[in-house]
Every structure is written in structure tokens, then in C-alpha cells.
Amino acid sequence: MSQMDCIIIDDESTARSIMEHLVLQNEKLKLVDQFSDAIQAIKFLNQSSVSLIFLDIHMPSFSGFDFIQTLKNPPKIILTTSDKNFAIEAFEYDCIVDYLVKPISQSRFNKAVEKAHKLNRKPSEKNTSQNDQNQINELYINIDGV
Amino acid sequence: MQEEPNLSYIEKLADGDQAFKNRLLAIIKEELPQEVASFKENLSQRKLALAADGVHKLKHKISILGLESSYAKAEQFEEELRQENIVGLAQFEITLSTMQTFIDKCL
């Protein structure tokens, strides 16, 4: 199974520790790094790429939304927050796949990862499935014609 | 009556992983007084927007410790602070003190 490389961005140590635990319990994820502020994460992303970011919205001086706007080609992002009120704004961004309200349970976390994993499937994998489907259709037509 | 904190969320999350549970409690024990001090500092300097940000951050720990009713009050207090109102301060300080006492007993 292909794993998604991910990072965690949250200014609160407690939250990072919980997110790290949630990530480590999910076999679809590989934790690459974690950051206490968005600036450090931007520096990291200038050198490396990841498939998924767990991003806290409410951080001092540089919010999660400010961070997203600095990214030219953002990966998939799952927002984490203590505040339900940002949900509408969150879905204005195509890269945001889900919105987790703290405290986050393992089951809710896994559901969000599953969404990201499905969206992260490479186009070639999707095309392969489509080709397989076409071949099945062609086979069906040939048999029908005999 | 002040509700009592509990470890339900942490225990469910840890799922028997005692090392993780202790590590998380140690982090909360270290971080909570720092966040409380920062909140009080901002409050004493009448930097109420920053104090509200502090309450926002503390809400996560309130929820982790299962204080549902206190969480709702903290949410209201955060909003009050953004309107430059500190009516909910006394109740919020009781919540902070209850959390600190509980965490100190846990470790």
C-alpha cells in the first residue's frame, strides 16, 4: 500500500503530540516532520514535498489560511482547529480535504485520511482502472456478437 | 458546581499505550502553566485580543480533560474578550486552577 508523506503544523506541543500519535497509528501515513510555526514549514517545503499537511488554523502572527496562500502548488491539507466557525472558509480552498475539530478521535482522523488518500491516487492509477473497465466492456461486446 | 476533569479522551486515544499517556500528560503539565502565564500577562497589560488568543489555545486542553461545560464557558469568554469584556474571567480562572490541580495529581 502506498503511504502518504505528511507533516504536522501546530504551535501547541500538546496538539503536535496528539497528531503525531494519530499519524503513527495510521498505516497509510508516513510522518516526515512537524513544525511549531508556519514559517519553518514554508522553509521546509521550499526544499521538500509532501502529499499531505495537517494544519492548525489558529496560530500567532501567521494563520493556517495565510500559510496556504503562500503555497503555489499546495498538497492535500487537513485542517485542525478548536473552532468550528472556520469551516465555511475552509471549503473555499480546493486543497483542503477535511476539517477536524479538536479534540480529535482516531476514528474521525482515519476517516479524514481515507478521503485524502482517495484524492491522492495518482492519475495513472485512475487511468489504469478506467482502461481495465474499457477492456471489460470490449470483451462483453465480443462475446455478445458470437 | 465546578465539573471535574477526567482522562477519558486521553485513555481512549492511548488505547493501552501507557508510555504515550504519560508522555502526553507530561507535555500538558509543562505547557499548561506557560499558556496560563502568557494569558495572564496579556490580560494585565489589557491586550485583550491576545488574551482571547490565549483562551482559544487553552480551550484545547479544556476539551482534552473532558470539561464540556467549562469549554462552552471558555468559548463565550473568548468572544467576550474580543468585545473587550472580561465578565467571564472569574469562572475561567476557576477552570484553569481546576485543570492545574488535576494535572499535578496525575503525575
Image (cartoon, rainbow, N blue to C red):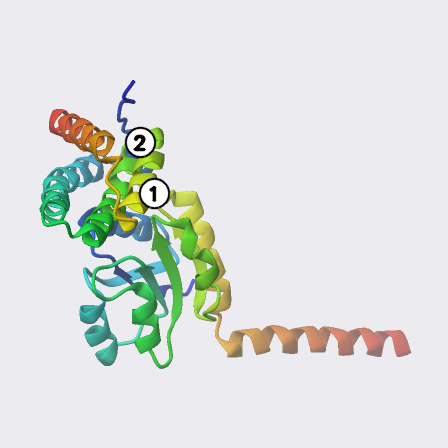
Residue lying at the far top of the rendered structure: B1
Residue at 23% in and 34% down: B92
Nearest to the observer: residue B2 or residue A105: B2
Q: Does B24 sit left or right of A58 as displayed?
A: left
- For mark 2, name the chain: B
Q: Do labels 2 and 1 share a chain?
A: no
Which quadrant is the N terminus of chain A positioned in? bottom left
Residue named by callout 2? B70
Which kind of residue does numbered mark 2 sit on? Ser
Residue named by callout 1? A103
Task: Estimate how packed mark 2 is, as few (under 14), some (14 to 19) or many (20 or more) residues with alpha carbons within 10 Å.
Answer: many
Where residue B103 appears, as percent x and y from the top left, is 16, 30
Task: Estimate how packed mark 1 is, as few (under 14), some (14 to 19) or many (20 or more) residues with alpha carbons within 10 Å.
Answer: many
Q: Distance between the residues labelled 2 and 1?
A: 15 Å
Can residue A14 be seen by looking at this rendering? Answer: yes
Nearest to the observer: residue B3 or residue B19: B3
Q: Tag 2, which secondary structure? A: helix
Where residue A125 appears, as percent x and y from the top left, is 53, 74
Q: Quadrant of residue A39?
A: bottom left
Q: Quadrant of residue B95?
A: top left
Residue at 49% in and 70% down: A121
Which quadrant is the C terminus of chain A positioned in? bottom right
Which kind of residue does numbered mark 1 sit on? Pro
Q: Does B56 sit left or right of B100 as displayed?
A: right
